[in-house]
Image (cartoon, helix red, strand yellow):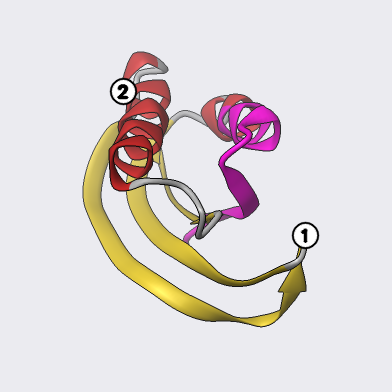
Amino acid sequence: MKRYETLFVIAPNVVEEEIKATIEKIKGVIENGGGVIDNVDEWGKRRLAYEINHFNEGYYVLINFTASPELPKELDRVLRISDNVIRHIVVKLD
């Protein structure tokens, strides 16, 4: 098991119920894949460094988790096809 973190940005026009549902969906992917979530840190709505899809703001969420090396590939796939997520990254921690 290795330690990872994922940071994703949800579009600012998404209502709060959908934000919570998106976060729960991502947490579910991690837990169903055999991962253990260490920390979920919701940074909230912040200004983007540059415009993405005509948005200047986004809702940032950081999740630290422990998982097998196969899980980040599936997590990346799910984040990539999620309509509410405008940017994401999954990083292996040392």
Residue 25 disc label: none
The residue that label 1 is drawn on is 53
**Magenta stretch, residue numbers:** 75-94
> Alpha-carbon distance for marks 2 and 1?
30 Å
Disc 1 marks which amino acid? Asn
Question: How crowded is the residue under tag 2: few (<14 C-alpha within 10 Å), some, or many (20+)?
Answer: some
Which residue lies at the image location 57% right of the left edge and 35% below the top edge?
Answer: 72
In-front residue for pair 60/2? 60
The part of the image, by quadrant, that contains residue 77 is top right
Residue 74 point in image, percent of width and height: 60, 24
Residue 70 point in image, percent of width and height: 58, 25
Which residue lies at the image location 33% right of the left edge and 68% below the top edge?
Answer: 44
In the image, which is nearer the foreground, mark 2 or mark 1? 1
Residue 35 point in image, percent of width and height: 34, 28
Disc 2 marks which amino acid? Glu
Q: Do we see residue 36 in this rendering?
A: yes
- Label 2–label 1 contact, CB within 8 A: no
Which residue lies at the image location 43% right of the left edge and 64% below the top edge?
Answer: 60
